[in-house]
């Protein structure tokens, strides 16, 4: 999708004689009328609040006594720097991202490739089955996992034990909690899979045939055709997954009822923000955390775009 | 399995005295390949959906079954049988002849016990040598529907469903109508700054919601909307980037000649939208509506912020999280509640599955 953003036609309004200007002015006015709802929303619910939250981050604002608010300069940011909880939550978030992002990307691509296989019958219903768990509320899909945390009688460990694999203490171990949360996340890959399917269907089959004629094996055509042609789609998914990871909340909150167990391993940055802002009522501090999160996500996205410039192939050519 | 397939297939073909290239052998081979691929896919999807099975079996179990040693995975109770008017437990007993039989334990003893054959209670009781405690108890299939009724009543499910439906429906209507208008504006009108505005729209996708969260919360609290549905609905009525992007892509694929023909007949811009664009885009609109409906149905963070202290207005996602916090020791109730929670979105999805998947793929990346 990012491909299409880059490929937007940059239409210059041609210089026209004065007398035909009137319909074009009218067209422009209608355009503003129709995008009006979004423009209003942008100001009231996005741009305005963004600015306010930036200002808020330099104050000690709280909702109970808004009248006592004072300007505290960079105090919140200094406090953040010295707050071990913030550092722990950043480390937890990054650790989780390092596992969850590859798992999501690979699983959604693997399912998409399997479910676009030319010789696979009944593709529609099969795709629907894989997509379906996205409808399962995150709270419910997390409950499947905590329903039975016991290492011996838990359903996953019984299966693992039956085939002779180790049986980790998934949700009470600081190490295994991240793979556990990543596996829970597999039930939410439906949208990424659908986007991958649409991308795979757009790869011209002649390319694969030509590669086969040239003696290329499955791996070579995957490396040389699928990956390059899918790169805009994969890039789009990667950006969305990355942002989602930094907003991770529901599953962690459900698992530990917001406590961040075990030993703060699931106290992700968004949980800290929720606690500071809405439990402890340190709204100024929470606003500073929100801006930290925004800056991190923005920086990572910009790095991705930077890397993408050389790695992502756009069929429409460079622009 | 894959490796043996061509060989078996070839020998079969030889046996039937077809050459390898005969059309019958070829179509047979293709059939075999297809069914093997299908089997493989089904196994993978089966593993993927396995936790669902766990939910279902747990939801029908007796409380405590999952932690009882020797209990089966499926919902069951220890089997009992009547002997002389009293219930006794049933065990699987290995007999001296190597077979094992299901017998009623009537007289447990340390080193030997007395059993009765349930099919023939009048026969002489069997004296079995061995420790009865080492025997496995027989279980009978006994699904317990009470879990569902208990969870239904404790959670006040009718109210939860009403709330969730209300919130999801209203916010979907607001989001879809506003997105249609905005997408139409971007797809069909030229105005100064259009491309810049569209880039800003798309850029809002990468904006973490936290950065606008606190001022919005303060604003809604000062407006007196905290503890109402309004913060869950109103912000969605101003279009969002995903919906606008998908709908705009779709609208742009509708030939402009249709608009122009309608305009020549005197239709204004809104008329064109209503009678040309919308009817042509039903698949995309259905897809976007369902996307938003599922999102709203499952949304957790925003309802948690505004409705945590208002049980009478809460949607189901908040309620079952709190239920879990309260009844964590009763997985049977929790899983029954979780199953009921997902029933509605899954039913909607299965009903609209065809239109939805088509709409998603056409609104997908390529167009």
Image (spheres, coloured by chain):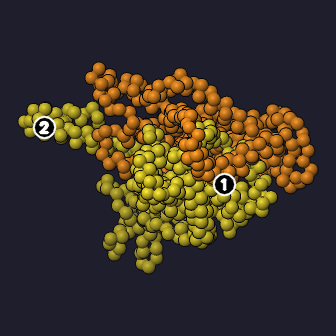
Chain colours: A orange, B yellow
- Looking at this rendering, what residue extends furthest in the bottom direction? B85
Label 2 secondary element: helix
- Is residue B334 in view from this perspective? no
Mark 2 Cα-neighbour bin, 10 Å: few <14, some 14–19, many ≥20: few
Q: Is residue A127 visible?
A: yes
Task: Report which residue position mark 2 lands on.
Answer: B23
Point out the tag, 1 or 2, that comes first from the N-terminus. Answer: 2
* Mark closer to the observer (1, 2): 1
Tell me the distance, in whole angstroms, between the alpha carbons under discs 1 and 2: 62 Å
Q: Position of residue B141 (x, y in %)?
A: 42, 65
Residue plotted at (13% across, 40% down): B24
- Residue placed most toward the observer, B207 or B14: B207
Image coordinates for residue B362, horizontal then vertical, percent: 42, 46
Write the residue at 81% across / 32% down: A81
Q: From the viewer's perspective, is residue B27 above or below residue A62?
A: above
Q: Position of residue A12 (x, y in %)?
A: 55, 33
């Amino acid at each position: 999708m990012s491909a299409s953003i880059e490929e937007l036609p940059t239409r210059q309004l041609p210089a026209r004689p004065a007398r035909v200007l009137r319909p074009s002015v009218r067209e422009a006015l209608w355009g503003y009328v129709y995008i009006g709802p979004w423009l209003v929303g942008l100001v009231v619910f996005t741009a305005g609040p963004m600015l306010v939250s930036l200002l808020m981050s330099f104050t000690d604002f709280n909702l109970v006594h808004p009248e006592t608010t004072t300007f505290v300069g960079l105090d919140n940011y200094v406090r953040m720097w010295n707050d071990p909880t913030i550092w722990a939550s950043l480390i937890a978030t990054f650790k989780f991202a390092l596992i969850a992002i590859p798992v999501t990307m690979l699983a959604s691509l693997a399912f998409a490739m399997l479910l676009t296989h030319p010789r696979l019958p009944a593709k529609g219903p099969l795709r629907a089955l894989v997509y379906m768990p996205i409808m399962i509320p995150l709270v419910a899909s997390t409950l499947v996992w905590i329903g039975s945390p016991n290492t011996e009688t838990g359903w996953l460990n019984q299966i693992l034990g039956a085939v002779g694999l180790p049986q980790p203490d998934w949700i009470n171990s600081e190490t295994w909690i991240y793979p556990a949360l990543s596996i829970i996340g597999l039930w939410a890959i439906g949208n990424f899979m659908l986007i991958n399917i649409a991308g795979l269907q757009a790869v011209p089959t002649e390319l694969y045939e030509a590669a086969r004629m040239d003696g290329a094996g499955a791996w070579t055509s995957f490396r040389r055709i699928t990956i390059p042609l899918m790169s805009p789609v994969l890039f789009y998914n990667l950006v969305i997954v990355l942002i989602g990871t930094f907003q991770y909340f529901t599953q962690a909150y459900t698992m530990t009822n917001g406590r961040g167990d075990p030993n703060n391993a699931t106290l992700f940055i968004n949980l800290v923000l929720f606690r500071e802002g809405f439990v402890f009522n340190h709204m100024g501090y929470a606003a500073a955390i929100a801006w930290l999160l925004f800056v991190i996500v923005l920086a990572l996205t910009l790095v991705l775009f930077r890397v993408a410039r050389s790695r992502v192939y756009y069929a429409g050519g460079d622009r | 399995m894959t490796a043996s397939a061509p060989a078996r297939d070839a020998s079969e073909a030889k046996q039937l005295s077809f050459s390898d290239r005969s059309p019958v052998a070829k179509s047979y081979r293709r059939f075999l390949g297809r069914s093997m691929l299908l089997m493989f896919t089904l196994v993978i999807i089966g593993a993927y959906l396995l936790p669902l099975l766990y939910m279902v079996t747990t939801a029908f179990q007796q409380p405590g079954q999952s932690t009882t040693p020797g209990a089966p995975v499926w919902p069951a109770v220890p089997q009992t049988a009547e002997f002389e008017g009293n219930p006794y437990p049933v065990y699987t007993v290995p007999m001296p002849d190597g077979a094992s039989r299901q017998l009623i334990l009537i007289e447990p003893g340390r080193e030997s016990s007395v059993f009765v054959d349930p099919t023939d209670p009048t026969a002489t009781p069997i004296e079995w040598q061995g420790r009865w405690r080492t025997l496995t108890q027989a279980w009978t299939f006994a699904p317990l529907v009470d879990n569902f009724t208990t969870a239904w009543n404790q959670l006040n499910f009718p109210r939860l469903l009403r709330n969730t439906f209300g919130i999801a429906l209203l916010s979907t209507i607001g989001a879809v109508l506003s997105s249609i208008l905005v997408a139409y504006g971007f797809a069909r009108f030229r105005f100064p700054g259009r491309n810049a505005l569209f880039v800003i729209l798309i850029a809002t996708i990468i904006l973490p919601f936290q950065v606008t969260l606190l001022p919005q919360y303060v604003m809604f609290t000062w407006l007196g909307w905290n503890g109402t549905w309004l913060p869950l609905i109103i912000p969605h009525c101003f279009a969002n980037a995903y919906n606008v992007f998908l709908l705009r892509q779709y609208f742009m694929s509708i030939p402009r000649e249709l608009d122009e023909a309608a305009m020549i007949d005197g239709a204004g811009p809104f008329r064109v939208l209503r009678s040309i664009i919308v009817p042509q885009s039903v698949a995309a609109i259905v897809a976007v509506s369902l996307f938003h409906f599922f999102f709203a149905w499952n949304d957790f963070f925003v309802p948690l912020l505004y409705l945590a202290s208002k049980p009478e207005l809460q949607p189901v996602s908040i309620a079952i999280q709190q239920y879990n916090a309260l009844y964590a020791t009763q997985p049977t109730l929790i899983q029954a509640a979780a199953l009921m929670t997902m029933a509605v979105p899954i039913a909607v999805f299965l009903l609209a599955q065809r239109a939805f998947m088509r709409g998603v793929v056409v609104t997908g990346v390529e167009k």
